[in-house]
Image (cartoon, rainbow, N blue to C red):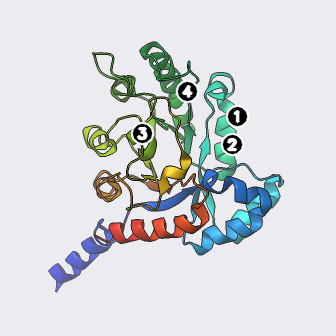
Amino acid sequence: MKIKHLLIGLLLISPMGLSAQEIALQLYSLRNEMKVDPVKYHQMIAEWGISALEGGGGYGMSDAEYQKLLADNKLKIVGVGADYNRLKTDPTGIIADAKKYGAKYATCYWIPHAEGPISMEEMKAATDLFNQTGEMLAKEGITLTYHPHGYEFSNSGSGTPMDYMLKNANHFKFNMDVFWVKMGGGDPLAIMKAHPGKFPQLHLKDRKIGTPGSPDGRGDVEANVVLGTGDIDIAGLIQEAKKQGTKYLVIEDESSRSVAQIPQSVAFIKSELKK
């Protein structure tokens, strides 16, 4: 009987018995809807079964009003933005933004660079900045993450700028947007497998079959489709996230159909987490 009880206990605390992953939503997915009725759409997010959010803008409300809206709907901001230029000039302000919500992650979504693919020199400068500021944020209990956007995959003969950053990321991690990595010519699952432990967040975003790639981090957002219906191995990424202990599986749907598609994507993630 003791062995039976022990096995039951292990099952309850293991990934098989209780998923360590949490489904989150990047609020940019509802950028147009929030302009119209932020109260309604925060309530809708909760109805979809999502409680973790990336964002923190406040939508014109005071801090107290927005905190109340979050609390009323049992929502929490788990990640805030970390603008590149602000990382250079005001990293303490980013720390304050995160602490205001109790967020443990701050993500840089874009590295300013000349139009087109990023150069190795620009990537080295960004890596140095992220290591420097990431160390500062870590002392405050906040993890700095970088969100690849597809312009990091031009091959210089000695690897890509993304290869360099992954190899030299000592004080920051990654919030990999699998759609944009695929758009740039990268293989999201292969990258994740090659660098275990570097992806506490994933932006799960599927791509319409037949969509052409893009080397400059730009493309048609209407190519965002319901998770599991496109040409990205979302199921494989979710299973790898379970193995690696990725904390947040973040849905970001930039299409005009996001309100209809997000709950379907939630259902897909939940079905994969049960496997």
Instruction: Give the distance between the C-alpha atoms of the residues marked 2 and 1, in whole angstroms.
Output: 6 Å
**Amino acid type of the residue that numbered disc 2 sits on in the rendered structure:** Asp
Tag 3: amino acid: Met
Label 3: which residue?
A: 183
- Reading the image, the residue beneath label 2 is 97
Q: Quarter of the image for the C terminus: give it.
A: bottom left
Mark 4 — residue? Answer: 111
Foreground of the two, 248 or 255: 255
Badge 1 amino acid = Gly
Query: Alpha-carbon distance for marks 4 and 3?
Result: 17 Å
Task: Using the image, tell me which numbered label, if any, was put on residue 93.
Answer: 1
Residue sitting nearer the eye, 183 or 62: 183
Which residue is found at the position 35% from the left and 67% from the top?
A: 273
Disc 4, SS: loop
The residue type indicated by label 4 comes to Ile
* Cα distance between the residues tagged 4 and 1: 19 Å
